[in-house]
DNA sequence: GTTTTATTATTAATATATTAATGATTAATA
DNA sequence: TATTAATCATTAATATATTAATAATAAAAC
């Protein structure tokens, strides 16, 4: 009876622990973190995004994003721009240096992505996506069920 | 051309972000964290484990483990025991309260696990494991390849 | 047998995650 | 329109991740 090591959180964690170091080698060459790259990547092909939009795209929690953006700003890769229409919003814009970093890194990121894609067939890749989606379906319902029987 | 949002790190992150909150509801009822539960779970059916063994089983990095074990010790769920044969080793042992927590939580953990298993067929579950394993195969080789062309 | 090398747990420094709360602002409502 | 509720970015407090380094001990090599 496989338990702990074969639970959903553990197999996903093992997978991520195997995958991220491959990317991280590249990140370290440019002295940025996983999270900092996610933000830069989100700004690709975008003039600007609000902090909230970046949070939704990158899956990075808003409170973490504050510090991440601080450090990207300090490194000169992004700027903050308070919105005039809605003064609650802050637009994040990539600087010239930020664009150059993106141009420099994106091809290598795609190489890495391709190297992973080569390890499975297109059908397997589709299956993976489909099964993961299935596991996250009815999330709300299951939460209610679990909540009731606790 | 699907890119960022459909990259391997992002689909795995989305999956984890959907899954962990279901477990976290239970963890919060017992006032422990994901990581703290992982350690307790690893000690299930074990008299003792070294810090290193726990790190390997739980995938938690050793430096993080120090603090995690500190807090579990402070909560009275584990004890530390310096080995006599090899004084570099520290054995982690669950206390009575730790055992009781495990007994209390494990059934509900398994309920949650079962609720996820019900969302996919056994074949799909096998496929998921197989595909994830495939993506992590030849890890060393691919790292060498990437290292060379950088 | 002593010097060198490995191993284990730990510390240190910085970055991020999690949860709750706050200040500023805008939208909704009575 | 005065008040209330919602939204956005941020702060605060605690826990964890990442990388490099260290102290204590043990194993290996000379």
Image: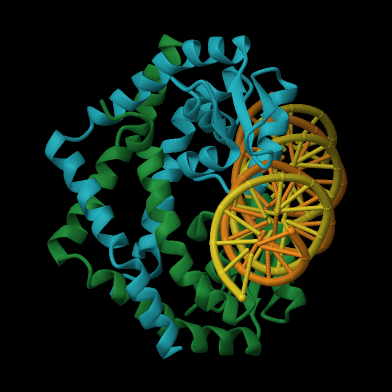
Chain colours: A cyan, B green, C yellow, D orange
Q: Is residue D1 left or right of residue A130?
A: right
Examine the rendered structure and indicate whether residue A51 appears above or below residue B88. above
Instruction: State the image coordinates of residue B77 (x, y, percent, origin top left).
Output: 67, 80
Instruction: State the image coordinates of residue B45 (x, y, percent, origin top left).
Output: 47, 80
Q: Is residue C12 left or right of residue A102?
A: right
Along the viewing direction, whichever of A36 and C30 lies nearer the viewer: C30
Along the viewing direction, whichever of A141 and B62 lies nearer the viewer: A141
Seen at 33% across and 27% down, the residue is A113
Instruction: State the image coordinates of residue B55 (x, y, percent, origin top left).
Output: 56, 56
Rendered image quadrant of residue A75: top right
Q: Is residue A89 left or right of residue A147?
A: right
Examine the rendered structure and indicate whether residue B112 appears above or below residue B20. below
**The N terminus of chain B: image quadrant:** top left
Rendered image quadrant of residue B66: bottom right
One can see residue A50 in this view:
yes
One can see residue B85 in this view:
no
Seen at 64% across and 90% down, the residue is B96
Instruction: State the image coordinates of residue A147 (x, y, percent, origin top left).
Output: 44, 82
The mark total stands at 0
Along the viewing direction, whichever of C23 and D3 lies nearer the viewer: D3
Seen at 41% across and 59% down, the residue is B18
Seen at 37% across and 24% down, the residue is A112
């Amino acid at each position: 009876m496989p338990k702990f090591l074969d639970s959903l959180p553990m197999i996903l964690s093992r997978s991520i622990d195997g995958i991220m170091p491959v990317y991280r080698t590249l990140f370290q060459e440019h002295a940025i973190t996983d999270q900092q790259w996610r933000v830069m990547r989100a700004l690709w092909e975008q003039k600007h995004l609000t902090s909230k939009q970046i949070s939704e795209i990158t899956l990075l929690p808003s409170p973490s994003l504050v510090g991440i953006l601080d450090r990207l700003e300090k490194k000169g890769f992004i700027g903050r721009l308070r919105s005039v229409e809605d003064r609650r919003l802050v637009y994040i814009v990539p600087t010239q240096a930020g664009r150059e970093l993106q141009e420099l890194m994106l091809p290598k990121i795609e190489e890495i992505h391709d190297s992973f894609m080569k390890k499975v067939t297109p059908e397997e890749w589709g299956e993976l996506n489909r099964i993961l989606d299935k596991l996250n379906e009815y999330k709300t319902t299951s939460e209610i069920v679990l909540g009731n029987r606790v």
